[in-house]
Image (spheres, rainbow, N blue to C red):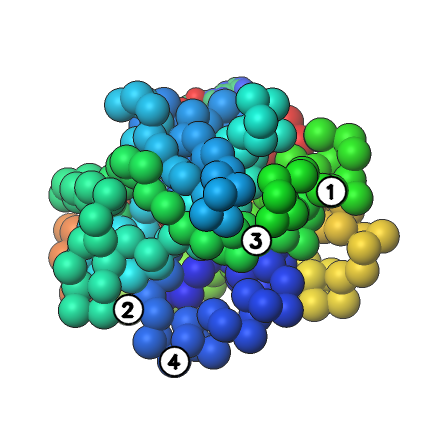
Amino acid sequence: MDFRGGAVKFLGTKRHHDKWLRATENYDMKGCFAMSELGHGSNVRGIETITTYDPTTGEFVINTPCESAQKYWIGGAANHSTHTIVFSQLNINGSNQGVHAFIAQIRDFDGNICPNIRIAECGHKIGLNGVDNGRIWFDNLRIPRENLLNSVADVSPSGEYLSAIKNTDQRFAAFLAPLTSGRVTIAVSSVYISKISLAIAIRYALTRRAFSIAPNGPEVLLLDYPSHQQRLLPLLAKIYAMSFASIELKMMYVNRTPESNKAIHIVSSAYKATFTWNNMRTLQECREACGGQGIKTENRIGQFKGEYDVHSTFEGDNNVLMQQ
Ligand SMILES: Cc1cc2nc3c(=O)[nH]c(=O)nc-3n(C[C@H](O)[C@H](O)[C@H](O)COP(=O)(O)OP(=O)(O)OC[C@H]3O[C@@H](n4cnc5c(N)ncnc54)[C@H](O)[C@@H]3O)c2cc1C
């Protein structure tokens, strides 16, 4: 498992790339991305995990100050991850500098949870049970100063806060930049899933017959019923359009520049919300269009509903994204 969203790449600098990127690619180090908390999901700016700096040892000290600050839903944390990117408020000399990201080890390479860390699992979900979502508490966890992902801001050995971005809103936006790649991936994968479910439902409608018009006549193909056409074909047309749009989004992302980042943020937010909502509507219609066969897990559509429902919530809740 990678640190999600290429966060080390985007938020870190050469020292982090040299130390961590190869290890995550080889799966020597299994990473997770600890942004959400029990008390704050969409409102990332309100997270309560707090990190201070100790200049006498050159270490950051991370704490979970209350139950609502426990990290929650962290994919890979419950059983597997050895490291996490932890998002936390950074308090330097009593002054809160806002949300920052740090690399912290949470397990040794034999899978034992590290001292000063507590982990629990989130429990069984309606889908995505292949991912071990977990909860994390930090109790005076000490990490080296170098583990601050410092492309946006840094702290000197003596404890001075340094950032080229003086505007706190812009600084916060820079820390959320890794989420864009997740939105692009989710938007595109929603289109793939809609295509698969439409292919299954339309093929079924081209072979399944129900009721005959004339006595003893052949039964009618489902797709020859106008009502069945009206249920599936507009969804098919829509997914053609969304497929072209998703290719455009991928190209925008691949060719991104500092100047185009804002446009990509807006387009990826809108497409992620629109495509994932459309995917759930498509899956339900396709499931029903297959009748009882749609319920069987081997026919996949019902399973997709459980697996992909969460796409409207994580990497930015759809209703919140539509306000961007
Ligand atoms: C399976 C799963 C895996 C996840 N993996 C990770 C992970 O690996 N790492 C991680 O950090 N997080 C992860 N998350 C957390 C996920 O990012 C959050 O659940 C998501 O950001 C929403 O936050 P929330 O659950 O607190 O909902 P809330 O923010 O409480 O939202 C609840 C409802 O309120 C609405 N709402 C909230 N604010 C507004 C507003 N301003 N205006 C209008 N409506 C609003 C929302 O639209 C939503 O319908 C995961 C979640 C799930 C379910």
Residues at marks 4 and 3 touching, judged by CB atoms closer than 8 Å: no
What residue would you read off at disc 3?
149
What residue is shown at x 59% (from left), y 68% (from top)? Answer: 15
Q: Amino acid at mark 4?
A: Asn
Which type of secondary structure does the marked residue at label 2 adopt? loop
The tag earlier along the polypeptide, 4 or 1, is 4
Q: Residues within 10 Å of mark 1 (few under 14, many from 20)?
A: few
Q: Residues within 10 Å of mark 3 (few under 14, many from 20)?
A: many
What residue would you read off at disc 2?
207
The tag earlier along the polypeptide, 4 or 2, is 4
What residue would you read off at disc 4?
26
Distance between mark 3 and mark 1 Cα atoms: 12 Å
The tag earlier along the polypeptide, 4 or 3, is 4
Say if disc 4 is inside 8 Å of ligand 1: no
Checking the image for residue 133, the label placed there is none
Distance between mark 4 and mark 3 Cα atoms: 21 Å
Q: Amino acid at mark 3?
A: Leu
The tag earlier along the polypeptide, 2 or 3, is 3
Distance between mark 2 and mark 3 Cα atoms: 56 Å
Distance between mark 4 and mark 2 Cα atoms: 46 Å
Q: Seen in the image, is 19 located left or right of residue 130?
A: right
Say if disc 3 is inside 8 Å of ligand 1: no
Q: Amino acid at mark 2?
A: Thr
